[in-house]
Image (spheres, rainbow, N blue to C red):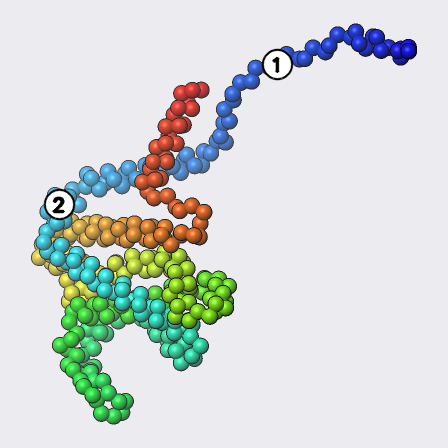
Amino acid sequence: MSEPPGAVALAEAPPAVPPPRHRLTAQRVQPLPRPGRWIATAVVLVLAAQFVHGLVTNPFYQWDRFGYWFLRPTILDGLLITLEVTAWSAVLGLLGGILLALARLSRSPVLRAASWTYVWALRSVPLIVVLLFLYNFSALYKTLSVGIPFGPAFFSFDESRLATDMAIAVIGLSLNEAAYAAEVVRGGILSVDQGQHEAASALGLPKGYQFRRIVFPQALRSITPNYVNQLIGLVKSTSLVFYVSLLDLFGTAQSMGSTYPGDIVPLLLVVTVWYLILTSLVSVIQFYVERYYARGATRSLPPTPLQKLRTGLRDLRERARREAAV
């Protein structure tokens, strides 16, 4: 059987020689130049350095007197009063805010109207006015009684004996805090998906159980950061109780400044540093509370500051190793 013409020529043709392989070399990708970022960073660093230099070298700050006053027993006593007022006001304000939020979301028009009126009034009146009004409350009502409206009283008591400086401060701050906490709690409850309410109702769960076990735990994810902001504001608002004769941290520093007029600036620095410490502690607590309630809502929990530090150090070592290899 004869082969087709050209078959022998194709069979005897030499194989094709592959092109020579070029050696692959690693090339580093250069980032885009960002001069604006570098200029802004340099300006911030210069301003920060000038600020720190002024704090350290300016004799007007009297850092030796700052060290003398920072841990004095009088300052620490005022700090304890600040912490006590803050703790009581935070707890009572949050409980009052929850009740006001539930009343605002109630189907009763009377409860809704009463809650709205309270929130509107307390958010409109400055806190210092509320405190001064409560401080002079005994001038308006000598005695308080509980009984039938327009009828006989079951028992009465002298208001001036119960209205101590601590009680006035806690009541005034709690009333003011409850008005703001009510809106925070209401917003957190409304942020829960409506399907959660419908699923709980379909299971026949009681309303109270739905709120405690299903709605409120999910609402806390939204309530926590907003209420912690309120709590930080509450810590600073305690400085106003000085005007109702309660010597808290600020009041003690103000009193000592009147006695030692040359130490006014160091005493103000002492108050500033203590408030910075208190608000920083509240922020740390906020982070861990948010991290706790983030379980089940995110794929992975937010890293803690220690975990961020470890990750940053590990990335820095790996980057240095890659730079050395190149």
Is residue 71 depicted above or below 252 in this figure? above
Q: Position of residue 63 (x, y in %)?
A: 15, 43
Which marked residue is nearer to the observer: mark 1 or mark 2? 1
Kindly identify which numbered label has been placed on residue 58: none
Residue shown at 42%/63% (left/top)?
Answer: 214
Residue that numbered label 1 is attached to? 21
Q: How many marks?
A: 2
Amino acid type assigned to the residue bearing label 1 in the image: Arg
Q: Position of residue 49 (x, y in %)?
A: 28, 37
Q: Give SS at disc 2.
A: helix
Q: Residues within 10 Å of mark 1 (few under 14, many from 20)?
A: few
The answer, for residue 197, to whether it is visible in the render is: no
Q: Which of these two is toward me, 244 or 205?
A: 205
Residue that numbered label 2 is attached to? 67
Q: Which of these two is toward me, 294 or 133?
A: 294
Residue shown at 83%/8% (left/top)?
Answer: 9
Amino acid type assigned to the residue bearing label 2 in the image: Gly
Is residue 304 depicted above or below 98 in this figure? above
Is residue 61 depicted above or below 113 in this figure? above
Residue shown at 50%/31% (left/top)?
Answer: 32
The quadrant of the rendering that contains the C terminus is: top left
**Is residue 318 toward the left or the right of residue 67 in the image?**
right
